[in-house]
Image: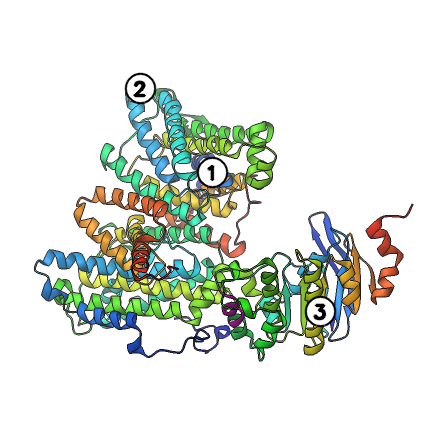
Amino acid sequence: MNFSELFSVAQLANALALASLLTILASGLALIFGLRDVMNFGHGALYMLGAYLGYSVGNQFSFWAALVIVPLLLAVLGVGFELAVLRPLQKRSHMDVALVTFGIALIIGPVVHKIWGTAPLSVEPPAALAGSIDFFGTMYPTYRLFLIAVGFGTCLALAAWLKFTRVGMHTRAVSQQPHVARMMGVNTDRLSLLVVCMGTGFAGLAGVLAGPYLSVDPGMGATILISCLIIVVIGGLGSIGGAIAAAVVYGFIQVIGTVLFPSLAVLAPYLLLFFVLLWRPQGFGRGRVS
Amino acid sequence: MLRVENLTVAYGSVQALSDVTLEVSQRGVLHGVIGPNGAGKSTLMDAITGRRKPTSGRVLVDGEDITQRPVEWRRRKGMSRSFQRTSIFPGLTVREQLDLVASQLGEPDLDEIIDAFELRPSLDLPADSIAYGDQRRVDIALAMIGKPSLMLLDEPAAGLSTTETIALFEHLVTLVRHRGVTAMVVEHDVDAVFRFCDEVTALDLGRLLVTGKPAEVRSDERVITAYLGTAA
Amino acid sequence: MSATPATLGATAAPAPAGSPRRALWQRPILLAGLLAAAAGFFVPGLIDTPYTLSLLINGVVLGIAAVGIGFLMHQCGFVMFGVAAFIGLPAYLVGIGSAQLGLGLTSAVVFALVGSTAFAALVGALVVRARPLPFAMLTLALAQMLKQVSMLQVMRPITGGDDGLTMSFDGTFLGLTQSALGKAPSFWPLAWAALCLVILIAWVAAHSRFGQVLRATQANEERMRFSGFDTYWPRLAAFTLSSFLVSVSGVLIALNSAYASPELLDFATGGHALTAMIVGGGATALGPLLGAMLYTWGQSAFGATGYLELLTGIAVVVMISAFPKGAMGFVLQIGHRLTGRKGP
């Protein structure tokens, strides 16, 4: 076991890179849950769709164009999701709606396969972000630093939005006390629309960002969904702060696992989940969007 | 038989119940608990029945410290409760739910309970289709099953008319005397409490004001102040 | 299997007050069920093409899994999204039992069932404390975890890794050799018998006091606890029973195909069972079977795998949105209307 390799700056950055991708996804999931009380089992599929779209748009135009266009496209999809699925099924049980989102995931998969095929695709980072730069003494891939910056930048922006804007405050209010917020005149339907679009847009953003970092393949939706579910359960359902913290922990556990036990690394998140559940069955966050 | 020692229940910085010590020493009594809103009456009930864990203090039944015991255990040992917001089984008929609980706890005379609470007409109706007043009586009847030695009733007359309230309390008194049950009743209807209860406890803002015979409590200055504010 | 919790007692289900216990031959549904069960064994004689029989077998095996998760959903309100875990695990255990442990076929089957059920009890101990939604998520994570384990390089010698586990059986199971198990006409009686047994177990459990307690807990868990009922152990027992029923289908798959692969642990596999249950309706013991049959028919009608997943997804979305009671609910409604009885 090479400790210096374990605790190097490079590994730290690796953990943060993975974490930043996961925070974007997990916060989107937590937002949708906080507002609509719905666990979106289709979130992984949306992310995958974003990654594939990012590939195509990136090839057609540029990575930077994809970074803007794809989240917008996914946000538009979010409109459909909110209006055609979440709103009509509001009164149904949470399990029913969860099953519907699971069904949506099963629909998106084959659609993606039909259009793009089943072979893995590779996405190159844009020229400006290709290669490595000197990072605290080691040469480190530039793209991953960019990923970390975007990831945590998004989190900060989201936190600021929630805390300092009126709409953000309404979001927090609705997710904590939907009835009271409605009585105070908050238009929850309009707010839901906004927040759900943000959630799906985030999934798209994460998908585009993931392209040059991970591979773009048909199984990526399922894998990342599980990671997100683990993160959201550990962080406490609906808590954004919890989701972000849990994503960081997840990133570290994954990276440490890969260094210490490379052949068993994939199991690290499950061990994490297992121990958290033993210790604190309801997760860590303070629950609801906070 | 029931003793609460230095019971404190705090939610964050709010002290719902502060250092309450009280005792119900006899069996077969009807003990009323009154207090203005926010006095901590329901919290007291929740702490005694195990629905809420106290921040500190103890709950003792017949000398045994039961503070850490789970809800199911307490019920099986003879401590039952009814709920402020009616909590019954909506899909089951009245008979089915009484039978279900009776099969778990054993009940030698279910007919007595059915008749005492006038549930015979609605026995085969789904519980969510009967009148509100009837549902409340089902809620209490469920707590009566299995010969509990200690019953805690949380605002049993909530939403009932004056006539219904009096009828309810008369039923309770009969059952309490007949079965030797000790019943602690949280109630907003102060008149009913003073009229029917053998002992009364008054709370305000989480603290115990006074406990004793109805006449004493009724004329206690602190109680009058709590309800009416300081006299001009 | 887990012991029956003491709180449920050994009391038989109380006869509903007012209705006399009727003799078996007086209850038309049970009689019809027995006749149908007996008739089922003659099916291969009626079917010409081996393809159709294989299709029916698929439907039956899927139906078994669907009945298993339908039981859990209807009695406890918990949906096992990760049902694939208990399809794939026992399948692998049959192979591992035969190859690694050198067990004869019958012992391997017992090993697989016991192992899968025991695993369910252990996982359940942790997982049934959760609310329904986290429960669903956790079972999904469980299935994915098992899939990852099966594909690990270090597990290759045991599970065959990506390539899956090809099995060779030693001995017979209920008189059937490996080659007999692989052929539809000789496999059918086993599959059909298993289905009848699974439906019987699910029906009996649902109509027992155990089922009553579970349903009442689903309706008002707090009141159950305040009425002296333990709510954790019954739920754990239900989860374990449900997983056992699902495991039967996994064992059958292994026996029929002599092969287990990571695909068995995939979302999509779970999706088939879930869809079958949803399409059929989880409220009755037979609903999921109906759903499985419909779904299997749909499978063959829609051919290519790609479209199948699409069909699954659409079926789930449509059924939940528009037909929450499933096909069986629809059938029952028609039945009630025809016989003039008021529906539930």
Q: Chain of mark 2?
A: A
Establish whether labels 3 and 1 are both on one chain: no
Location of residue C20 in the rendering, given as x and y in whole percent from the top left corner = 40, 78
Distance in Å between CA atoms under marks 2 and 1: 31 Å
Q: Which residue is mark 3?
A: B170
> What residue type is disc 2 on?
Phe
Q: Nearer the viewer, mark 3 or mark 2?
A: 3
The answer to whether mark 3 and mark 2 are in CB contact below 8 A is no
Same chain assignment for discs 2 and 1 = yes
**In terms of secondary structure, what is the magenta stretch mainly?**
helix
Residue with the mark numbered 1: A32
Query: Residue lying furthest right in this view?
Result: B232
- As helix, strand or loop, the secondary structure at mark 2 comes to loop
Residue sitting nearer the eye, C203 or A128: C203
Query: Magenta segment, which residues?
Result: B93-99
**Inter-mark Cα distance, 3 to 2:** 83 Å
- In the displayed structure, C286 sits above or below B38; it is below
What count of labels does the image hold? Answer: 3
Q: Is residue C296 visible?
A: yes
Mark number, residue A61: 2
Instruction: Indicate the position of residue B113 as horizontal and vertical percent values.
Output: 60, 73
Residue B207 in percent (x, y) is at 79, 56
Crowding at mark 2 (Cα within 10 Å: few <14, some 14-19, many 20+): few
Which percent across, then down, holds residue B18? 77, 55
Residue A127 vs A159, above or below: the answer is above
Q: Is residue B188 left or right of residue A170?
A: right
Question: At 26% from the left edge and 73% from the top edge, which residue is drawn?
Answer: C31
**Distance from the alpha carbon under mark 3 to that under mark 1:** 52 Å
Q: Secondary structure at mark 3?
A: helix
